[in-house]
Amino acid sequence: MAGRGAREYFGQARRRVGGGALEASFVDRVRAQLVARLSGGNLGRARRMATDPEGLAFRDVAADALARAAAGPGEALAAAADVLDAAAAYKKGLRAELDEELAPFRDEKGRPEEAYRGAIRRIETRFARRERRAERDQVDRILLAASALLRDRIAATVQAPTALRLNLDRDAAPAVEVGGLVASLAAVEGARAELADDVNRNARLVVEQAFLVVAGAAAG
């Protein structure tokens, strides 16, 4: 993966979502470039990451989970639990957004005003659809961040140019050899693909399997 191949591999994310589209929305230039690289090519996701004060919190969850998984199989299972707990907390936090959106349609006692019952039902229906997706989507964001962190470590290990890394604001420690990192990246991306392809898959088992690979790679 050295040389030209590494530059092409790590340069893909830069071409998927340009930071210019975000800068046009008056987002700080450095943050715009950062979220453009971390969004997985999804402009809507990039905008949310750029404008939400907690938009990058999932990356801390991913970093902590990778570090914990590297400590061994038992910690890998705990790391998977941390990811799922963070996703559940994110879903729970959405309820406050619903309350805020419905507030203009309620009276001073918090009861729905008769004239707005249709609008309230539409808002609640839209929210229910979003809430059903929210937890699984947040798991995907965390796994995407884990992939980005692993990619940066691979880049550092093969001495790819720093400009090609995804997390511009974080240092990436090179490993002794690249094989374990590649296996870990493949496992995390495999977990993302499994959860995207089959919404009925047990997310806990899928994420645990991925982090057990991370633990095995660290031990090797």
Image: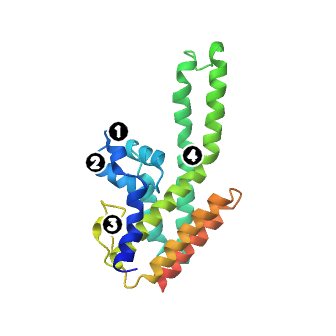
How packed mark 4 is, by other alpha carbons closer than 10 Å (few <14, some 14-19, many 20 or more), is some
Where does label 4 land, which residue? 91
Residue 98: percent from the left, percent from the top? Answer: 56, 32
How packed mark 3 is, by other alpha carbons closer than 10 Å (few <14, some 14-19, many 20 or more), is many
Q: Is the Cβ of the residue at disc 4 closer than 8 Å to that at disc 1?
A: no
Closer to the eye: label 4 or 1:
1
Whole-number angstrom distance, CA of label 2 to CA of label 1:
10 Å
Where does label 3 land, which residue? 164
Q: Is the Cβ of the residue at disc 3 closer than 8 Å to that at disc 4?
A: no
Helix, strand or loop status at disc 3 = helix
Q: How is the image coloured?
A: rainbow
Whole-number angstrom distance, CA of label 4 to CA of label 2:
29 Å
Seen in the image, is 93 located left or right of residue 14?
right
Residue 33: percent from the left, percent from the top? Answer: 33, 53
How packed mark 2 is, by other alpha carbons closer than 10 Å (few <14, some 14-19, many 20 or more), is few
Whole-number angstrom distance, CA of label 1 to CA of label 3:
24 Å
Where does label 1 land, which residue? 25
Please state which of residues 68 and 185 is positioned toward the viewer in this rendering: 185
Which residue of the protein is positioned furthest toward the top in this rendering?
A: 115
Three-letter code, disc 1: Ser
Residue 189: percent from the left, percent from the top? Answer: 54, 67
Whole-number angstrom distance, CA of label 2 to CA of label 3:
17 Å
Mark toward the start of the polypeptide (1 vs 3)? 1
Helix, strand or loop status at disc 4 = helix
Whole-number angstrom distance, CA of label 3 to CA of label 4:
33 Å
Where does label 2 land, which residue? 29
Helix, strand or loop status at disc 1 = loop
